[in-house]
Image: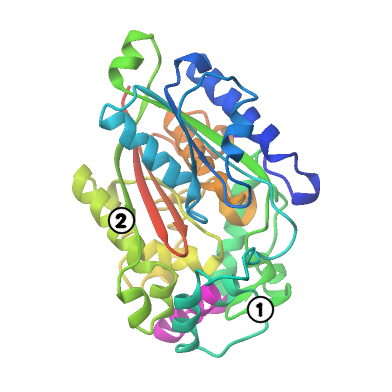
Amino acid sequence: MIPFTKPSAGDTYDSMGERAVRAALEDAGIGYELVRQAYVGYVYGDSTSGQKALYGVGLSGIPVVNVNNNCSTGSSALWLARQAVEHGAAECVLVVGFEQMKPGALQNVWNDRPLVFDRFTEAMAGAQEPADAPLAAQLFGGAGAAYMARYGTAKETFAKISVKARRHAAHNPYAVFRDPVTEEEVLASPHVYGPLTRLQCCPPTCGAAAAVLCSEEFARRHGLSADVAIRAQALTTDTPSTFASGDMTRVVGYDMTREAARQVYEASGIGPGDIPVVELHDCFTANELITYEALGLTPEGTAEKFVLDGDNTYGGRVVTNPSGGLLSKGHPLGATGLAQCAELVWQLRGRAEARQVEGARLALQHNLGLGGACVVTLYEKVS
């Protein structure tokens, strides 16, 4: 990946994408001519922006597929690439995600046609009062408020997640926000919705990340050090419970996450208690909190204790978002899933420097997009 930046300091999407691709190819030790397919993820861009970015690397004539699945775009592209390799459609596949974002909250681009979030806003209207806040903050802040009402969670618990994110990001040269914050500063920042304050919301960000996937035979034939494998992966979308339950935690994808995690654990034979490091989708502190439970990292109703006991950081049960996560590293939508991938591969290779989770041989990734789609991926060190 390349260092993420604020929108005012960002480069153009094609330049960012090209830089990430070249870095991934160099890391893999291969030339672009060996890549047989490419999947390119972005949300805010014209059709075939993927070709625009890749043509700066080479004009090889390979299939280039553009992917848009909201905030889970990067991991959805990874899911497609993994399928292509696993099923023998291609031996070596490139995945890249990028986003050139504007400052401020996310906005609808197309207002002359049915809005994709209609069902979500209808479900939200039945569960909570409308407010003058960005839609995503109302959705995830509402989920945090619903969790607080159910379990009596303190607002300070949510703030601790932001403090932890900054503490982790301090050691990540790719992160946007690396300066520490205190719990008091988080709580004193402008209120947004529910338990959320501004310092509990991820920032709009520019950036890019990329990965090269190949078969074991391809790696052997080309003498590559393919030391990390995808052990299991699942992509899920919404079910009736998202809209019919009246539960805001489900409106924002709790059940999608739980089902994707179940599929991954079942396919791999690995349980959540075996995983030492996780990159999860902390677009808001509320989503990190409920995702602890959806992934099975802690039983339902115990996320607050999980945080207060320090089980979500170094020295605890599982290090969550060692990169600083979306809250501190930033959230360029199309790049986020692949940035999570990069962080976890570095962790498994022992190359995460001051962020290193010692002895990690398994790593779990969670990337969520409302609308909706959730991708959970389990990585394994294989050599």
Q: Which residue corresponds to mark 2?
A: 260
Describe the colour scheme in one phrase: rainbow
How crowded pointer 2 is (Cα within 10 Å; few <14, some 14-19, many 20+) is rated as many
**Does residue 270 appear to the left or right of 284 in the view shown?**
left
Amino acid type assigned to the residue bearing label 2 in the image: Ala
How far is disc 1 from disc 2 in space, using C-alphas? 30 Å
**Does residue 168 appear to the left or right of 297 in the view shown?**
right
Give the numbered dot on residue 243. Answer: none
Residue drawn 57% across the image and 52% down it: 43
Q: Is residue 153 magenta?
A: yes
Residue drawn 50% across the image and 36% down it: 342
Q: Is residue 22 visible?
A: yes
Q: Is residue 30 visible?
A: no
Q: Nearer the viewer, residue 383 or 84?
A: 84
In terms of secondary structure, where does tag 1 sit?
loop
Q: Where 45 sits versus 238, above or below?
A: above
Give the numbered dot on residue 133. Answer: 1
* Quarter that holds the N terminus: top right
N-term mark: 1 or 2: 1
Image spot of residue 354 (x, y percent)? 58, 36
Image spot of residue 16 (x, y percent)? 67, 35
Q: Which residues are magenta?
A: 139-155
Q: Quadrant of residue 378?
A: top left
Image spot of residue 151 (x, y percent)? 40, 82
Image spot of residue 73 (x, y percent)? 49, 49
Majority secondary structure of magenta residues: helix
Q: Where 33 sits versus 191, above or below?
A: above
Amino acid type assigned to the residue bearing label 1 in the image: Ala
